Image: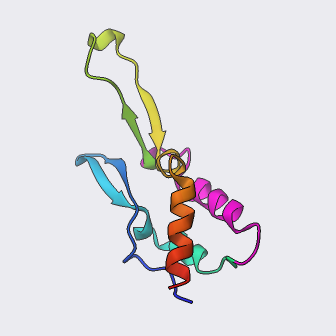
Amino acid sequence: MNKFTNKMTWNVYIYRHGDGIQIYNVFDHRHFVEYLNKIDFDNVMAKEKVRRELHYYFGSKAEWEVYISDIFGFMEEREFEKVSVYDQVMLNFDKFFKYLLEVKNE
């Protein structure tokens, strides 16, 4: 069984003050990767544990959020949607978890 490393890739969008919107690889977060290496992926609760840790590290924290808006309409009428790294990963969580299993079992 392999260990998870930051050589894996799952990109999301983040906002860095002064640098603007950037692409970020969630596996560059050392503590998240360390936690993944502790999970027993043979356990039926593994998927839920990964989801909870994603939320812990990447959910509802300003440094992991971007605001999305359409480009049409007037500025004062424009609505913005706050999207966190957690939200972005959850859009394809089944594929994300499958990716983890594939890497773990290589």
Q: Residue furthest bottom?
A: 1
* Main SS of residues in magenta: helix
Please give left or right for residue 8 compared with residue 92 in the image: left
Q: Residue at x 60, y 74 (%)?
A: 35
Q: Residue at x 28, y 14 (%)?
A: 75
> In the rendered image of this protein, does residue 65 appear above or below residue 56?
above
- The percent coordinates of residue 61 (x first, y second) are 52, 47
Q: Quarter of the image for the N terminus: give it.
A: bottom right
Residue 27 image-quadrant placement: bottom left
Which color scheme is applied? Answer: rainbow
Q: Is residue 27 magenta?
A: no
What residue range appears in magenta?
Answer: 42-63
Please give left or right for residue 10 compared with residue 96 in the image: left
> In the rendered image of this protein, does residue 47 appear above or below residue 37?
above
Please give left or right for residue 47 compared with residue 26 in the image: right
- The percent coordinates of residue 60 (x first, y second) are 55, 44
Q: Residue at x 63, y 57 (%)?
A: 51
Q: Residue at x 70, y 68 (%)?
A: 46
- The percent coordinates of residue 10 (x first, y second) are 40, 62
Residue 97 image-quadrant placement: bottom right
